[in-house]
Amino acid sequence: MHPMLNIAVKAARRAGNIISRATRNLDIVAVREKAANDFVSEVDREAEQAIIRTLREAYPDHAILAEESGASGESEHQWIIDPLDGTTNFIHGFPHYAVAIALRHRGVVTQGVIYDPSRNDLFTATRGRGSYLNDQRLRVSKRASVKSGLLGTGFPFRQVEHIDAYLAVLRDMMKGATGVRRAGSAALDLAYVAAGRLDGFWEFGLSPWDIAAGALMITEAGGMVSDLAGESNYMETGNVVAGNPKVFVELLQAISRHLTPSLKQG
């Protein structure tokens, strides 16, 4: 394992331990609404600080971009952190959430960790060295079309102006795919695409910490990731389409039929 990936795994497991302890007493976890239907708990903050401490112990000069505390430092190395992706699931005791950590070097994501503490699933990736679930090498699925595929998605709850376009895509996918799942953690859903548990995924309005680690895992597992225009600007736009190569192409074409001018630009 790459040394920087090893440190990220250490940080993710420390955060996972904090999250797992908190699940025993969810009734006393303090929660605040950051925006409509967007929550942060004291566990998010505690987990994020544990991650940052671990990373800074090893790499004190690296920059940080974290969901709760924002950006800090200047360096060609930047850690991108989501301490608890799926907070709403977590506070309801719905076991689909994860810790996500990625390292970006000179603008390119080179390391990624997604840790699901409820299942003890550790997804990792290093650019050029493949993706893994625990010690097992990952490959995207081999399904040949959306028709035979199981797709993941997320609702654009932060960008209500895109709901009509999103629902049009969802309607087509519900008619065309074997099934569509909205589980509530984009990071973990992207890891599932890398693992072949999902054949494709799309969502609008995500943040870099939702996407970075999972996108690397998918490409390292033989899959494809893009923005809605089929380009590589998904970290900037927050709009992402992913899947095995055949499902990805078909899913991207289906989405393109419903893009509004603002989605085409973003």
Image (cartoon, rainbow, N blue to C red):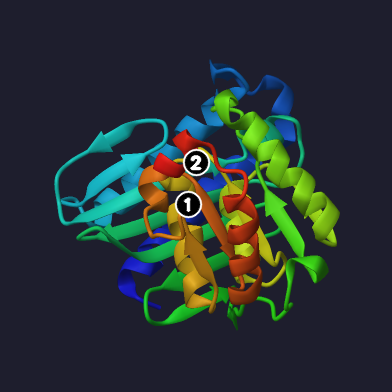
Question: Which residue is label 2 attached to?
Answer: 206
x then y, percent, for residue 33: 57, 17
Q: Is residue 250 visible?
A: yes
Callout count: 2
Q: Could you tell me which residue is drawn at 37 percent across and 66 percent down?
A: 111
- As drawn, the label of residue 228 is none
What residue is drawn where x is 35% and y is 76%? 2
Residue at image coords 82%, 70%: 148
Image-based side of 193 in relation to 232, left or right: right
Kind of element beneath mark 2 = loop
Q: Amino acid at mark 2?
A: Leu
Name which residue lies at 77% across and 50% down: 172
Using the image as rendered, state which of residue 230 and residue 38 is in the foreground: 230
In contact (CB < 8 Å): disc 1 and disc 2? yes
Q: As drawn, is 225 to the left or to the right of 121?
A: left
Q: Residues within 10 Å of mark 2 (few under 14, many from 20)?
A: many
Distance between mark 1 and mark 2 Cα atoms = 7 Å
Counting residues from the N terminus, which is met first, the one under dot 1 or under dot 2?
A: 2
Q: Which mark is residue 211?
A: 1
Q: Residue 8 location, x and y as percent?
A: 40, 60
The N terminus - image quarter? bottom left
Q: Quadrant of residue 164?
A: top right
What amino acid is found at the position of numbered circle 1 in the picture? Ile
Residue 149 screen position, x and y as percent: 77, 67
Q: Position of residue 196 (x, y in %)?
A: 68, 72
Would you say 155 lies left or right of 172 here?
left
* Classed neighbour count for the residue bearing mark 1: other residues with Cα under 10 Å, few (<14), some (14–19), many (≥20): many
